[in-house]
Image (cartoon, rainbow, N blue to C red):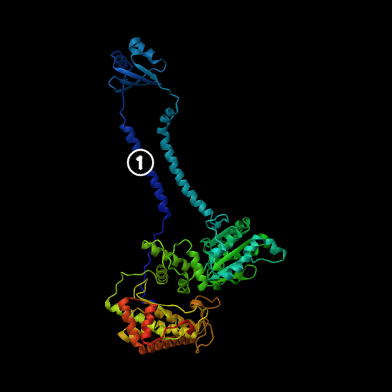
Amino acid sequence: MKLFTQNNQQKKGKEKNPKFDFSKNIFGTIFVLLLLTVAYSLLSGKEDTPVEVSLSNLAQSIDAGAIKSIEVSGNKLSIIRSDDTKETALKESEAALTETLANYGLSKEKLAAVTISVKNQSGFMFWVANILPFALPVLFILFFFWMISRQVKGAGMQALSFGQTQARVTSPDDKNQRVLFKDVAGAKEAKEELKEIVDFLRNPKKFLDIGARIPKGVILTGAPGTGKTLLARAVAGEAGVPFFHLSGSEFVEMFVGVGASRVRDLFKVAKKAAPAIIFVDEIDAVGRVRGTGIGGGNDEREQTLNQILVEMDGFEPNEKVIVMAATNRPDVLDPALLRPGRFDRRVVLDLPDREDREEILKIHSRKKPFAEDVNLKVIAERTPGFSGADLHSLMNEGAILAAREDRKKVSQFDLIRAIEKVLLGPERKSYLLSKKEKEITAYHEAGHALVASVLPYADPVHKITIISRGRALGYTLKLPIEERKLQSKKEFLDDIAVSLGGYVVEEMLFGDVTTGPSNDLQVATSLARSMVTRWGMSETIGPVALEGEGGRALFGAGIDGKEYSEAVSAKIDAEVSKIMQDGFARARDVVTKYRGALDAIALALVEKETLEQDDYEKIIIANGIMPKKKEEK
């Protein structure tokens, strides 16, 4: 049980501004253009510019023997003197160079002493060298405008694709994402129901020949984490058909009519790929009861739901397209969605029992190296109420704890610690308590444990600790001896008394009450109210259900509409208060009678900080309290 509750502040991530990204691309392009321009200028500036001379000066230099070589490129002359300096000159286009120099009075012997070469003017590099200085700026400008148009085109195409389906498709040939029934442990009855869907998709003729009509829609309901999505993927994997997966919220957009358009496109694509499975997760986002007065008749969500209903009615038995959906809120779905001919088959997935939990743990442990002391049966017994997702997280946390301590194998101790981490959060050894706070915490948890050990219908204690974990400064771990699907009024009353054990001890021993029991009071009050308004466990109110799950009004009433009067509301409040006061009195009687056991448990907690089941039972046996055994239940 949690002792202290602390408020956690959540940091909101900054949303990305698309305009900022667009401007960043523009400025980046301009920066690159300027950078290349500067580099080109620097590189071109480093080259030495040759001195241009006249042909007469050239003739005089050749006559003096000061010229080493001349390269002729069209009308341009590249001259290298004897001291390796460079000069340039222009010749006449109509005459050859030797002829021009001979006209200046140079002899053949002087011309023969100079190396004269002619460069080909028709090469590719000649054209590149002449065109590139003009073409490069033009190319950068064109590239700049192309990037702008690309951004605008992307936004326009996104607007035009609003009406297209956003479903992700898993191909039956994709072995990495393929899931089979052997990969889903537990849920035996659910898998039996869905095997008929697999048979129909594989061999529809067998059903059609005998006049059977396979359900068009299957809705999976159950608590979060029970494997609804995984089971739907397993149906597609067993049947070997495409799997179209999307969430119900993906149909709903700001613009009216987009959701209906996406529904039409989804069913159109699925029919082309038939046989196929369409899976809509969290369908309650779009399939809630219509006519509640919210959003008006032109509400986008209602139009989307209407289109889903029409598309499912349009199916023919031989189209071989099955619609599957999942939700943990079947009570809010529109009745037209659940009528025969649409989602006319409901598959309920319950939380796994002990045997199922053991099978789930075996699946999640396939790729994990275990030490010799690992016993998955014990882990399954210590995790009542865990869903499949919780068990997956447990195995992963156990592996993380082993890797953090540089061990190659996962031990039983890692898995035991992982149970508490999944239930309450990480251990906070650095969160030090003062001597007074440690004493209050120890007596608080000792009060929970003592009341649970004395009352006949409370679950036995498996562990007590005052080491902070998550938001709790201490907790008492209670686990049932046997799993049960039904709980009685006597068990609820004992649970309320156990929840108030810490509050009673603080008030009796310290003459004051801290903020520690806040979570205990919330849990106990909620349980007492449910007993009165949901389960008919009040003699004053009688066998009447006044509220739904979580305090919601029944039968799809308005947001704040109540199905009972103010007088009945006052009776409910009085009855809840009476149940809480009775639980307080029972807990006070237990603490008063077994004060010696309370002091012994608290002192042991202050000394050791953690008491496991064996050490705890030795203390209560020494004080005249017998621990609960299986045969007593």
**Residue 84 lies in quadrant:** top left
Q: How many marks?
A: 1
Residue 74 falls left or right of residue 348? left
Q: Nearer the viewer, residue 116 or 287?
A: 116
Residue 315 falls left or right of residue 536? right
Image height of 550 relative to 47, above or below: below
Q: Nearer the viewer, residue 47 or 398?
A: 398
Q: Nearer the viewer, residue 166 or 297?
A: 166
Neighbours of disc 1 within 10 Å: few (<14), some (14-19), many (20+) = few
**Residue beneath disc 1:** 35
**Residue 270: where, in percent of width, then height?**
60, 58
Image height of 29 relative to 411, above or below: above
Q: Tell me if residue 463 can be seen.
A: yes
Residue placed furthest toward the front: 372
Q: Quadrant of the N terminus?
A: bottom left
Q: Give the residue type that dot 1 points to.
A: Leu
**Residue 425: where, in percent of width, then height?**
39, 70
Q: Nearer the viewer, residue 443 or 151?
A: 443
Q: Secondary structure at mark 1?
A: helix
Image height of 532 relative to 179, above or below: below
**Residue 99: where, in percent of width, then height?**
38, 12
What residue is rendered at 72% in x and 66% in y?
Answer: 211
What residue is rendered at 37% in x and 17% in y?
Answer: 116
Q: Tell me if residue 216 can be seen.
A: no
Residue 120 falls left or right of residue 177? left
**Residue 592: where, in percent of width, then height?**
35, 89
